[in-house]
Amino acid sequence: MFDKLNIFLPSILAMFAITVAAESKYPVKLKFEQMSTRDVSMLLNNHNVPQIIASSWEAASKTYLSKPPTGKTAKYDLNGDDIEEIFVYLSGQNMCGTGGCHLIIFQYSTENQMLEYKTARSSSDDILILNNLSSDGYHDIAIRLMDGTSMSKAQAYTVYKWKNGDLKQTDKTTLFQRPDNGN
């Protein structure tokens, strides 16, 4: 009896591990976590972020004391160097417009030993990594855009291509079934 268990248990565990790995591979939904106002300010002011974004953040933080803007962060290794890129999402009054709120992507520079600003887009915090690096070296990233004025999200995700700090919007959109009714 124990011999059969010793033979079957490793194979059952291996099958379970393969199933879990296959289920959790792609798409990957980025999980954003809240940042402190101080940490957002330090990040925006010290890493070559365009002045218009940094000054909008500072102005909104000082003007809307009862309901200040928020910053959230997520991480994902987009270029396969085992160092995660940093996604920062800024929202709140004066931080969003008709194209959405600010999404900023930073990449760690091993040469300069620091985070470097790469790109910013009007966006939302609903982001999916669709695949591993493709044959042309790009990641496909799907972003569910939103109207930052009405705060309503689009039904479909817009597909972008990412490579070495360059985030290019494509003409493709895609829908995903979401168990939480798409919110």
Image (cartoon, rainbow, N blue to C red):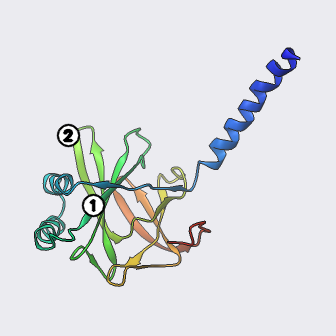
Question: Where does the image place residue 29, in percent across and percent down from the top left?
Answer: 50, 57
Which circle marks residue 71 in the picture? 1
Q: Which residue is drawn at 32% across and 58% down?
A: 72
Looking at the rendering, which quadrant does residue 2 occupy? Answer: top right
Report the disc number at residue 112.
2
Q: In this view, does 172 lie above or below 37?
A: below
Which residue, as the protein is rendered here, is positioned at the far front?
Answer: 66
Q: Nearer the viewer, residue 45 or 1?
A: 1
Q: Nearer the viewer, mark 2 or mark 1?
A: 1
Task: Tell me the residue at 16%/54% (across/down).
Answer: 38
Q: Which residue is drawn at 77% across and 25% down?
A: 9
Q: Which amino acid does label 1 sit on?
A: Gly
- In this picture, residue 97 sits left or right of residue 183: left
Q: Horizontal and vertical percent for residue 22? A: 65, 46
Residue 158 placement, left or right of 174: left
Closest to the observer, 176 or 132:
176
Q: What element carries label 2?
A: loop
